[in-house]
Image (spheres, rainbow, N blue to C red):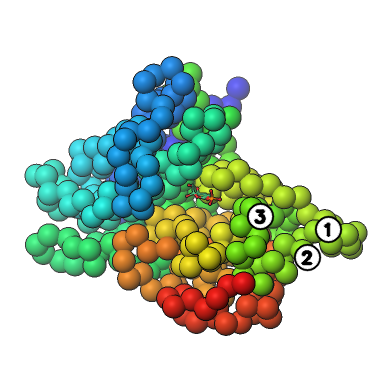
Amino acid sequence: MKIAKTLGQFIIEKQADFPYAKGELSRLLRDIGIAAKIVNREVNKAGLADILGEAGTINIQGEGQKKLDVYANEQFISALKHGGECCIVASEESDEYIPIDSEISKDAKYIVAMDPLDGSSNIDVNVAVGTIFSIYHRKSTGGKATIDDVLQRGTEQVAAGYVIYGSSTMLVYTTGKGVNGFTLDPSIGEFCLSHPDMKIPKDGVIYSINEGYYAHFPDGVKKYIKYCQVEDAKTNRPYTSRYIGSMVADVHRNLIKGGVFIYPVTASAPNGKLRLVYECNPMAFIVEQAGGKATNGYDRILDLEVKELHQRSAIFIGSENMVNKAEEMMACFSPQLTKKNFEGLVELQ
Ligand code: P6P
């Protein structure tokens, strides 16, 4: 039986892709993989441990934190602190960025932005949740790294990845040279290469959007939804609607099967709901590396200016041809939203 390649073996093998790297990025990815295995253990037994339900605290997003949100946040921060390769952690669960100034991290040159447990409202009902992470080089030199080291454009990412805690647990990541997927083999406690060189189909028949907000969508989104529902054998329509409510799960499905995930601006989320730094940018990097596309309906996600840590953005991400069609509808029916940002959004209805 062929022994699958473990994440650790793969990372070291690929280290040769970075002639100047002295192993720091490899160790950083290893640290993330270790934390993911620890979080996976708790997610998988959440119903048994006293770790379900509300933590009784509110995060900066104003969202009630689940006990597992807090636990996952602590595990990833701890792994990054003790790994010594990271000088700042920015997390959806923490209001401010977290400087890592331990002795072991004094020469650390990487920044990690993460959503430690995305989709956590699904935990109590046993639906797939995920971790999303984004890695940058520290830009500043000398002294302590600052928030400016975090607020870098998505194009500056050194690596990005996600963990999906689903029917199996997978870690999918890119360092800018393609996308590879690893499935956790619980019998040996290792992530093993299961999806080498992942490519998203250029077309698909799955559209993923929360149609409950239909009344508050921009006209361009409404038109695209109707386009998906029209009978047309030549273009394999009507498409299938699939919405899990967990970005990692919806994007991962589309990465494998083809499809488009859309979270547009709405009346209640005039700048979009998903966060640019630790959700949109890392997922956009991964999907682009797999041959897909990610925009805010008009502009490439990775090119967007990053002004603040918890900045939100609309996102249209997935199969290139499907994103292009949705963008056509936005340009045609919601041109007023073509501004470089959505502050002072005009009426959506
Ligand atoms: P809605 C989960 O809370 C999340 O941040 C993403 O994982 C998911 O795609 C989205 O929000 C779901 O939002 O408004 O459809 O419940």
Viewer-nearest of labels 2 and 3?
3
Kindly check if marks 2 and 1 are in contact, taking CB atoms under 8 A apart as contact.
yes
Q: Residue at x 41, y 30 (%)?
A: 53
Marked residue nearer the N-terminal end (3 or 1): 3
Instruction: Answer with left or right where residue 205 lies relative to residue 85.
Output: right
Instruction: Answer with left or right where residue 198 lies relative to residue 56.
Output: right
Image quadrant in which the C terminus is located: bottom right
Viewer-nearest of labels 3 and 1?
3
Q: Is residue 145 visible?
A: yes
C-alpha gap between disc 3 and disc 1: 18 Å
- Does mark 3 have its CB less than 8 Å from ligand 1? no
- Does mark 1 have its CB less than 8 Å from ligand 1? no
- The numbered disc on residue 237 is 1
Q: Quadrant of residue 109?
A: bottom left
C-alpha gap between disc 2 and disc 3: 14 Å
Say what amino acid the circle numbered 3 marks: Glu
Label 2 sits on a secondary structure element that is helix
Q: Which residue is mark 3?
A: 211
Q: Callout 2: 10 Å neighbours few (<14), some, many (20+)?
A: some
Residue 263 image position (x, y, % from top left): 56, 59
Label 1 sits on a secondary structure element that is loop
Q: Which residue is mark 2?
A: 227
Q: Residue at x 39, y 55 (%)?
A: 278
Label 3 sits on a secondary structure element that is helix
Q: Quadrant of residue 57?
A: top left
Rendered view: 131 above or below 39: below
Q: Residue at x 58, y 72 (%)?
A: 348
Front in this rendered view, residue 137 or 260: 260
Say what amino acid the circle numbered 1 marks: Arg
